């Protein structure tokens, strides 16, 4: 069982590493508000990754059928969510209410929920999880309580990655001034807008040309 747990821990890390909307969001939160806000955002991603791990173990066929059926809807809604989040990051000043830039704020439920919504809007993430389970050769045929250590190990791997990621960039925020931070925030927001528009465009293409 121990090798399976180690593999599952590695899956949690590998599922979190790709640079995408979640990584950009955690980066923005860590740089703007500090480690706690960034880590809370990462926990939102961990929640979704863990859910996908459960689906990979228990309901692979069902999850694939759901994605095939509602892929266009997920792309449209996900594109709007990510583009709107990017717009907010790019064109609002997140530092206007901050009296001391060196001070970190506490984590909030909003940080967590933004990450959950962003992660759920990316239907390809669950396919990545399926592929990782297959690549590492994790035995997902276990039943009952024997499968829960695998699920927990995936969650632990994802949490560990986001803790280190947010901690590193939360520390780095002290090395740059507010003006530079604002531009980094705007660039991150524009990247998210582009990703969101691309997803929305893909969904519209599915509706207009493949139906």
Image: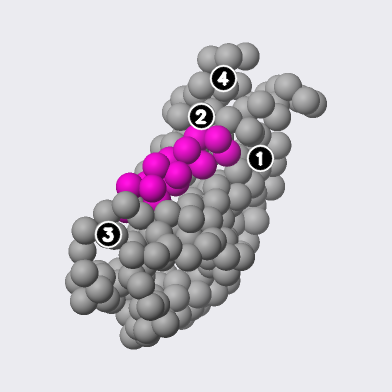
Q: Main secondary structure of the magenta part?
A: helix
Query: On screen, 41 above or below 3?
Result: below
Q: Which residue is mark 4?
A: 4
Q: Which residue is mark 2?
A: 9
Where residue 95 sits, quadrant-wise, is bottom left
Q: Say if mark 4 contacts mark 1, CB within 8 Å.
A: no
Left or right of 157 in this view: 60: right
| Crowding near the residue tagged with mark 4, few <14, some 14–19, many ≥20 C-alpha atoms within 10 Å | some
| Crowding near the residue tagged with mark 1, few <14, some 14–19, many ≥20 C-alpha atoms within 10 Å | many
Which is more N-terminal, label 2 or label 3? 2
Q: Which residue is mark 3?
A: 174
Q: Considering depth in this image, is 167 or 209 the residue closer to the camera? A: 167
Q: Which residue is mark 1?
A: 54
Query: On screen, 47 above or below 98?
Result: above
Q: Residue at x 44, y 76 (%)?
A: 85
Q: Which mark, by number, is residue 122?
A: none
Q: Which contiguous range is marked in magenta?
A: 155-169
């Amino acid at each position: 069982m121990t090798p399976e747990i180690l593999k599952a821990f590695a899956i949690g890390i590998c599922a979190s590493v790709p640079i995408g909307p979640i990584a950009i969001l955690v980066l923005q939160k860590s740089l703007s508000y500090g480690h706690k806000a960034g880590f809370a955002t990462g926990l939102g991603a961990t929640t979704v990754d863990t859910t996908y791990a459960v689906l990979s173990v228990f309901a692979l066929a069902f999850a694939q059928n759901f994605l095939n059926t509602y892929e266009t809807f997920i792309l449209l809604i996900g594109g709007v969510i990510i583009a709107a989040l990017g717009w907010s990051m790019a064109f609002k000043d997140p530092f206007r209410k901050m009296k001391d830039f060196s001070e970190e704020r506490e984590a909030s439920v909003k940080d967590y929920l933004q990450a959950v919504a962003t992660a759920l809007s990316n239907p390809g993430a669950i396919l990545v999880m399926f592929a990782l389970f297959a690549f590492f050769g994790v035995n997902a045929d276990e039943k009952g309580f024997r499968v829960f250590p695998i699920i927990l190990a995936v969650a632990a791997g994802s949490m560990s990655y986001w803790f280190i990621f947010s901690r590193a960039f939360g520390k780095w925020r002290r090395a740059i001034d507010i003006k530079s931070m604002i531009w980094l925030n705007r660039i991150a927001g524009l990247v998210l807008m582009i990703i969101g528009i691309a997803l929305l465009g893909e969904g519209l293409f599915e509706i207009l040309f493949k139906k």
